[in-house]
Amino acid sequence: MTKAKSLMLTGILALFSASAFAAPMPHEIYKPAGARTVKADRQGNGEFEYVAELRGRRGSIPAIAKRVIAHARHNGFKVVESEIKRDDADLKFKRGNQELDVSIEDKDNGRIEYKADLDLDKN
C-alpha cells in the first residue's frame, strides 16, 4: 500500500469515527453563537448532555442566560429555577415530565463553559 493510500484511508476512518459518534442536537437545547462543542452525547432514556466552550467577556453570562431562557420558553419549558450572576448562571426548566438544566460558568481568560442536560423522559 502506498503512503498516499494509507494517509487517505486514515483520513476517511477519522472522518467516519467523528461523525459516527456525533449525536444530533435536540432542538430544545440552545447552542450559543460561536460555541465550540466539547461533548454532545445521547445517553439513553431520553437524556442528552451538551457541553461547549465559548469566548466571552465580562457581562456575557447574563446575556447568554437570557437567550437560553427565551429559547426554552419558545420550546414550551417553564423556568423553575433561575440564579444568574455576573460570572455564572444556573437555570432549571420543566415541560410536563421533562427537565432541562443549564449551567454557564466563567472559567478563566475569557473562556465560558456552557452545559445543558436534557431529560425528555423524567419519571
Image: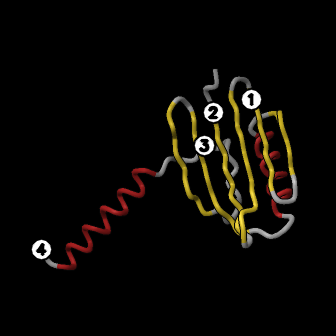
Q: Amino acid at mark 4?
A: Met
The disc placed on residue 119 is 2
Extreme-bottom residue of the structure: 3
Q: Amino acid at mark 3?
A: Pro
**Nearer the camera: disc 4 or disc 2:** 2
Q: With 40 as the anchor, is 103 left or right in this view?
A: right
Q: Position of residue 2 (x, y in %)?
A: 14, 78
Q: Quadrant of residue 117?
A: top right
Residue at which label 1 appears = 95
The disc placed on residue 26 is 3
- Dot 2: few (<14), some (14–19), or many (≥20) neighbours within 10 Å? many
Q: Nearer the viewer, residue 20 or 39?
A: 39
> In the picture shown, does residue 108 fall above or below 19?
below
Q: Amino acid at mark 2?
A: Asp
Q: Amino acid at mark 1?
A: Arg
Extreme-left residue of the structure: 1
Q: Earlier in the sequence, mark 3 or mark 4?
A: 4
Q: Earlier in the sequence, mark 1 or mark 4?
A: 4
**Nearer the camera: disc 2 or disc 1:** 2
CA distance for labels 1 and 3: 15 Å
Q: Earlier in the sequence, mark 4 or mark 2?
A: 4
Q: Earlier in the sequence, mark 1 or mark 3?
A: 3
> In the picture shown, does residue 15 fall above or below 97?
below
